[in-house]
Image (cartoon, rainbow, N blue to C red):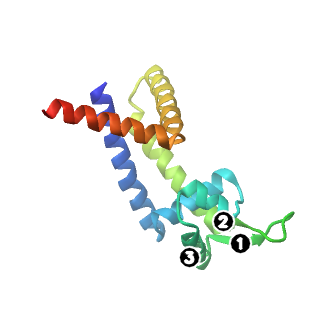
């Protein structure tokens, strides 16, 4: 089980490097690329939703959206039912760019596992789904994370004695 956690960490690190490389190739930063991904998968969103989904400061979202608009990848439009709000949408160029990124990603994943048995890929997909769900559930409970970290730290100190 420890080896699985180590390999998952290696995948996460590789994914971070991959995301930076993809964003750089597009000429944007990782937060901008993540914004494009959210808009592709969630549809038009108000800036406040992007703040929550991306975990960025509300003061940062305006500058981020300005950069994406200057690059021609997004635009802010009036909200159809709330005159006080705007929605961030992908432009055709933004949609094409983020779809291309996901296509390359999908192809890279496919190429990495194409020699595997289909049954193994199905099992791996189920395991990844369960891992993602468990991590999402843990992340939704910050107090429980703090408690677990304290317990783990205390246990580590006890074994050091």
Question: Crowdedness of circle 1 by 10 Å Cα count: few (<14), some, many (20+)?
Answer: some
Q: Which residue is located at x 26 percent, y 31 percent?
A: 155
Q: Is residue 32 visible?
A: yes
Q: Which residue is mark 1?
A: 76
Instruction: List x then y, in percent, for residue 113.
Output: 40, 34
Query: Which residue in the structure is indicated by mark 2?
Result: 47
Question: Marks 3 and 2, how far apart in space?
Answer: 11 Å
Mark with earlier residue (3, 2): 2
Q: Nearer the viewer, residue 54 or 59?
A: 59
Q: Which residue is mark 3?
A: 63
For the question of whether residue 99 can be seen, the reply is no
Q: Quadrant where the C terminus lies?
A: top left
Residue 153, x across and y down, in percent: 28, 38
Cβ–Cβ under 8 Å for marks 2 and 1: yes
Tell me the residue at 37%/45% (across/down): 12
Viewer-proximal residue, 103 or 147?
Answer: 147
Precedes in sequence: disc 2 or disc 1: 2
Q: Position of residue 94 (x, y in %)?
A: 62, 66
The N terminus lies in which quarter of the figure?
top left
| 37 and 148: which is toward the camera | 148
Q: Is residue 101 above or below residue 151?
A: below
> Disc 2 and disc 1: Cα gap in Å?
9 Å
Toward the left, the furthest residue is 161
Q: Quick check: 116 left or right of 94?
A: left
Q: CA distance from mark 3 to mark 1?
A: 13 Å
């Amino acid at each position: 089980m420890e080896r699985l956690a180590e390999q998952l960490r290696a995948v996460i690190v590789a994914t971070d490097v991959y995301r930076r490389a993809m964003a750089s190739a597009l000429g944007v930063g990782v937060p901008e690329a993540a914004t494009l991904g959210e808009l592709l998968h969630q549809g038009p969103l108000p800036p406040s939703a992007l703040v929550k989904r991306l975990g960025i400061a509300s003061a940062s979202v305006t500058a981020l959206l300005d950069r994406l608009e200057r690059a021609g990848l997004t635009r802010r439009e009036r909200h159809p039912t709330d005159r006080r709000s705007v929605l961030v949408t992908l432009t055709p160029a933004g949609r094409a760019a983020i779809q291309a990124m996901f296509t390359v990603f999908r192809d890279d994943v496919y190429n990495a596992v194409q020699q595997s048995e289909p049954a193994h890929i199905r099992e791996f997909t189920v395991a990844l789904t369960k891992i993602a769900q468990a991590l999402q559930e843990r992340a939704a409970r910050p107090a429980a994370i703090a408690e677990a970290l304290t317990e783990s730290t205390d246990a580590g100190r006890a074994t050091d004695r």
